[in-house]
Image (cartoon, helix red, strand yellow):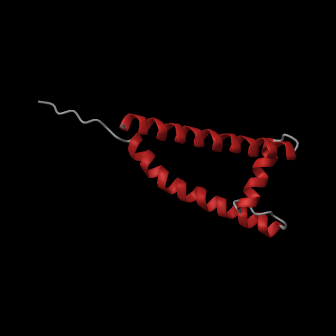
Amino acid sequence: MAIKEMKSVRTIMVGSGCFFGLWALAAMLGGLHRVNWQVTDLVRQYLVASGMVQPIHTMVDFYTHIKGIEYIICVLFFVAFPVFFQYVEKRKTHIRS
C-alpha cells in the first residue's frame, strides 16, 4: 500500500514541477519576445524591476556607485591577501634524525 502512495506522491510532484517549469519557460520566452530577443536587455529590466540596479541620472550618482564598488573590492583584497600569503609561504618542515 505504501508503494502506491509513494508513486502517487511522486507523480504529483513531477507533474507540478513540469507545470511550473513550463510556466517559467513561457514567462521567459514572453519576456524575450517583448524586448526583441535581447537577453541583456531582459536581464537589465529584471534587475531594475527588482531594485538590484538603480538608474543613474547624474555624475554624483555614478561616482557614488563606483566608489561603493571600490570599497567592496578593497575589503575583499584585505581579506584575501593574508590568506593567499599564508598559502604561498607555507613551508614543509622535515625532521632530521
| Quarter the N terminus occupies | top left
Q: Nearer the viewer, residue 77 or 2?
A: 2
**Residue at 84%, 66% in the rendered image:** 57
Spot occupied by residue 65 in the image (x, y as percentages of width and height): 72, 63
Q: Is residue 92 left or right of residue 65?
A: left
18 vs 87, nearest the viewer = 18
In the image: residue 3, left or right of residue 34: left
Q: Position of residue 46 (x, y in %)?
A: 75, 54
Tell me the quarter of the picture where residue 69 sits.
bottom right
Q: Looking at the image, which residue is at 75% across and 46% down?
A: 27
Residue extending farthest top: 97
**Residue at 75 percent of width and 42 percent of height:** 26
Direction from residue 43 to residue 18 in the image, left or right:
left
Q: Position of residue 48 (x, y in %)?
A: 76, 59
The image shows a total of numbered marks equal to 0
Q: Nearer the viewer, residue 14 or 3?
A: 3
Quadrant for residue 18, please give it: top right
Rendering coords of residue 42 (x, y %): 79, 48
Residue visible at 36% across and 38% down in the picture: 2
Q: Which quarter shows the C terminus?
A: top left
In the image: residue 5, left or right of residue 53: left
Name the residue furthest front.
1
As drawn, the residue found furthest toward the left would be 97
Q: Is residue 60 above or below residue 9?
A: below
